[in-house]
Amino acid sequence: MADAELSQTLAKIIGLYGLILAMSSLLNRQNLTNVFHELMDSEGLMYLSSLMALIIGLVLITIHNVIALDYRALITIFGWASFIKGVIHLMIPELAYNLNRGILHFQKTYSLIMLVVLCASLWLLKEGFSVSI
């Protein structure tokens, strides 16, 4: 797969993921807050979600570690953020727990984060589904 094609494919996947995540978070705020609280109270589920974040991050930074001043940088940032999140959750679970609780506690902060995710996802979708001649 050519580099441009890989970037567009990843933009589509991450863009759709982010769009669904942001919209569901903004539309079902209370329900998702309850789900996140239950998730954080389960050490086993937190461990599994940390492993998933770590694996996703490792895959992305291995196959797409692109430094550019365009949408491809978002893919790289997503990969590194996922990797760092996985490492922090596995190595310092108390810190991760406190950060997650803090974000969920402040509704405006959480909504702002989801709006940023929504905008970034729309940009990735625009770039991923654009056709270049």
Image: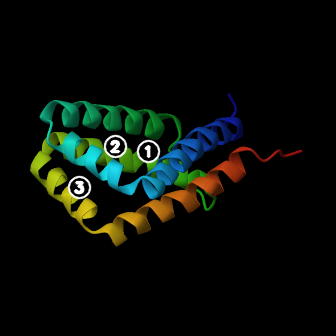
Element under label 1?
A: helix
At a point 67% along the width and 41% down the height, the residue shown is: 8
Q: Is residue 75 left or right of residue 79?
A: right
- Residue highlighted by disc 1: 79
Position of 107 compared to 115: left or right?
left
Name the spot of residue 105 as percent of width and height, x first: 23, 64
**Callout 2 touching callout 1 (CB < 8 Å):** yes
Q: Name above or below for residue 112 compared with residue 114.
A: below
Return the residue found at the far bottom.
108
Residue 29 in the image: state x and y as whole percent: 38, 56
Give how far apart the Cα atoms at labels 2 and 3 are.
16 Å
Identity of the amino acid at label 2? Answer: Phe
Label 3 and label 1: CA atoms lie apart by: 19 Å
* Crowd tier of the residue under label 1, counting other residues whose Cα lies within 10 Å: few below 14, some 14–19, many 20 or above: many
Task: Mark 3: give few (<14), some (14-19) or many (20+) Cα within 10 Å.
Answer: some
Question: Which quadrant does the C terminus fall into?
Answer: top right
**What's the residue type where badge 1 is placed?**
Gly
Residue sitting nearer the eye, 8 or 118: 118
Q: Residues within 10 Å of mark 2 (few under 14, many from 20)?
A: many
